[in-house]
Amino acid sequence: MQIPRRFLPSLALLTAFEAAARTESVTEAARELSLTQSAVSRQIRALEAQLGVTLFLRERQTIRLTRAGAAYAREIRDALRKISTASLNLRANPAGGTLTLAVLPTFGTRWLAPRLGGFLALHPEVGVNIVTRLAPFDFALEAVDAAIHFGHADWAGAEMMLFRHEDVVPVCSPALAARFIVRVPADIRRAPLLHLVSRPDAWERWFIAQGVDAADVRGMLFDQFTLVIEAAKAGLGVALLPRFLIADELAAGSLQPLSDSPHPAPEAYYLCWPPDRADHPPLIAFRAWLAETSVRDGAGP
């Protein structure tokens, strides 16, 4: 469906309006855009005439957004940002396209980043941009092609591909392990426990799986895996962590497992994407590489 021309103001009119709305000054907008004040004023009035809406209240030598103007400015600013990002991505990689991926911070740092060179070697024509996100979001409001999600296959409005499971293990510093001798899983309850905000019932589920009373489990609370890992290394408590994310610490001995009882998490890692990006060539290539890499790691579905 073709959009009527009156609803598509020129970029010149929109950039003049956005600059004036952001700076609340025609003078500042003119300086920023290398135009005269009268030229910016004319562009803003032309935009108001095209839309049939007053965007600014003019009081002597000052301007102030109307309520409608403020709402319009927010949306136009976001649209201009998306246009700028798309143009930058195209200029950076005109041949193969770009994949913008939202990832969980610790997963991105400890698992994806060390392996991403393998994908880029296979697909040098693809540019990859990484942003971090801790929770699911609305793909309609975020300019990303796909996201790494840990949880269940319940991201509304998204297509999902399960690509790896995880086993969690209780770990702590060697010094703390020496203070709290653990012979059976129930012994861990005597030690201070470290909890993650995004997995508030992880310890309860682990104790129940080991046949241990899980009532009234308490301890320090953290909002990111990285902080939990560092706190455990510093001897602040016992953390329940995915083995694959702490492989380096386990190998170096800075973290020590307190139990060898395997406990697969009921959640899993998924690659998620909006349906309208399913056929995006860089995403197709990344999906295939991610699935193959996970199987090679022995953690695929």
Image (cartoon, rainbow, N blue to C red):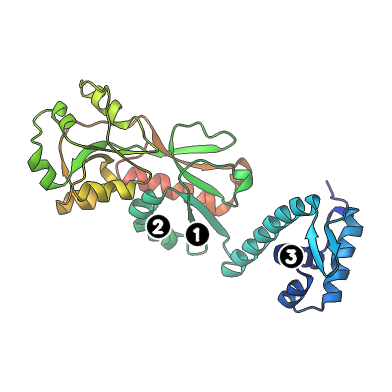
Element type at mark 1 = strand
Give the secondary structure at mark 2: helix
**Could you say where residue 179 lies in the image, as x and y percent from the top left?**
8, 40
Q: Residues within 10 Å of mark 2 (few under 14, many from 20)?
A: some
Query: Where is residue 260, by image quadrant?
Result: top left
Q: Is residue 50 left or right of residue 19?
A: right
Mark 3: give few (<14), some (14-19) or many (20+) Cα within 10 Å. some
Q: Amino acid at mark 3?
A: Glu
Residue 24: mark in rendering: 3
Residue nearest the observer in this picture, 20 or 245 = 20
Disc marking residue 128: 1
Hey, what amino acid is under mark 2?
Leu
Query: Judging from the image, what secondary structure is the residue with disc 3 in?
Result: loop
Name the residue beneath numbered marker 2: 116
Label 1 crowd bin: few (<14), some (14–19), many (20+), radius 10 Å: some
Which residue is painted at 48% across and 42% down in the image? 135
**Dot 1 and dot 2 residues touching (CB under 8 Å):** yes
